[in-house]
Image (cartoon, rainbow, N blue to C red):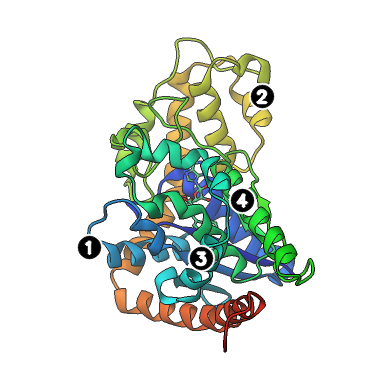
């Protein structure tokens, strides 16, 4: 049996990259081998406050993120969905790690450099130490597998380093914190912006035209795909022809992931054809696959009390699993009690 853990931040709306790079794989892992895996899916609101946040919007964004998980196929009867802030052991374990992790390890993290931008002095300490809280999110459950998009690879490596170093430093054998395996899989582990194939699609990019949100209606999806940046040439027929054509490569990858094919299969079908033929096909496919999720999300959001009940039940279970690990870790470090 595997123990699966993954999380998303309740910041802005979820976008296609979140779905294809991560959420879809969460559902697949929940259903794998007849559903034997134990799955925990968190909404990491403590991470969301590392950048300026809207106090009025946070709780609802947490509900909406949980609704997106369920709408995409996470089954709250089999998987635990919870808000990170409702499980205090995340923050407790994060402090134990913060106090003992070398700054050099964090200085290597590229995402902080990207997110802090030029104004490093003004970035919060939390944004800097964010990967340590993420390591705590994973290790507090002794998770064995973590399905994420490609951009989280480096953070997962840090979580493995923290686990290994704790096990060694406090002589608790190799097994106290198992080293979590990243699961980065599928044809769209890194979905790129619709307006610039060299930039990652992101919830926080300024222009809404760069991404497809899980809440977009059919017309908006079609419009965004029609306006997506492409190039004047016909679609590539093989990997070699994709070189230097990031936008074509990205749209083919999205088509492949949405249609459960390999990119090669999609190139066999569309290679040599014009974007004017490919884009409407992609728009139809995206609407077909995403609109059931959007509709289900809207239904769920109409009953926030039901989502709150799911989050409460998830937090209860998560607390049961998390607190003993935190207490044990504290004991291994020599604390009184
Ligand atoms: P975030 O939006 O940063 O909370 O990301 C939540 C999850 O979605 C993580 O597993 C990310 O790796 C994944 N993800 C975010 N953006 C993308 C993208 N453009 N392509 C693939 N995966 C992504
Ligand atoms: N850092 C992740 C992101 O921005 C979100 C995250 C927080 C996470 N804690 C996690 C992902 C634990 C996987 C496991 O996408």
**In the image, what residue occupies the spot 46% across and 25% down?**
197
For disc 3, the marked residue is: 94
For disc 4, the marked residue is: 158
- Indicate the secondary structure of the residue bearing disc 1: loop
For the residues marked 3 and 4, what is the alpha-carbon distance in whole angstroms?
Answer: 13 Å
Q: Of marks 2 and 3, which one's residue comes earlier in the chain?
A: 3
Residue 107, x across and y down, in percent: 52, 42
For disc 2, the marked residue is: 268
**In the image, what residue occupies the spot 58% across and 46% down?**
105
- Indicate the secondary structure of the residue bearing disc 4: helix
Q: Residues within 10 Å of mark 4 (few under 14, many from 20)?
A: many
Compared to residue 38, the image places residue 335 above or below, namely below
Compared to residue 36, the image places residue 204 above or below, namely above
Mark 1 Cβ and ligand 1 under 8 Å apart: no
**In the image, what residue occupies the spot 43% across and 49% down?**
128
Q: Which one is in front in this view, the residue at disc 2 or the one at disc 3?
A: 3
For disc 1, the marked residue is: 55
């Amino acid at each position: 049996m595997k123990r699966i853990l993954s999380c998303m931040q309740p910041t802005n709306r979820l976008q296609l990259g979140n779905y294809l790079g991560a959420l879809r794989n969460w559902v697949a892992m929940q259903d794998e081998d007849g559903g034997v895996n134990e799955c925990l899916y968190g909404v990491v609101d403590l991470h969301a406050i590392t950048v300026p946040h809207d106090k009025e919007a946070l709780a609802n964004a947490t509900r909406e993120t949980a609704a997106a998980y369920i709408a995409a196929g996470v089954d709250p009867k089999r998987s635990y969905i919870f808000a990170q802030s409702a499980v205090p052991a995340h923050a407790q374990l994060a402090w134990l790690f913060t106090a003992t992790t070398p700054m050099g390890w964090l200085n290597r993290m590229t995402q902080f450099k990207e997110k802090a931008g030029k104004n490093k002095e003004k970035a919060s300490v939390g944004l800097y130490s964010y990967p340590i809280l993420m390591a705590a999110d994973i290790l507090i459950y002794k998770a064995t597998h973590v399905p994420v998009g490609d951009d989280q690879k480096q953070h997962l490596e840090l979580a493995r380093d923290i686990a290994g170093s704790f096990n060694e430093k406090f002589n608790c054998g190799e097994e106290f914190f198992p080293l979590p395996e990243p699961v980065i899989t599928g044809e769209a582990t890194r979905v790129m912006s619709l307006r610039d194939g060299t930039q990652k699609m992101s919830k926080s990019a300024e222009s809404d035209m760069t991404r497809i949100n899980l809440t977009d209606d059919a017309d908006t999806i079609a419009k965004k795909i029609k306006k997506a940046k492409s190039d004047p040439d016909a679609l590539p027929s093989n990997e070699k022809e994709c070189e230097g054509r990031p936008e074509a490569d990205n749209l083919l990858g999205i088509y492949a992931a949405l249609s459960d094919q390999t990119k090669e299969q999609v190139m066999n079908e569309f290679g040599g054809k014009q974007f004017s033929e490919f884009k409407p096909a992609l728009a139809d496919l995206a609407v077909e696959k995403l609109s059931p999720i959007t509709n289900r999300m809207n239904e769920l959001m109409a009953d926030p009390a039901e989502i709150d009940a799911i989050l409460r039940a998830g937090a209860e279970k998560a607390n049961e699993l998390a607190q003993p690990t935190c207490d044990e870790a504290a004991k291994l470090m020599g604390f009184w009690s």
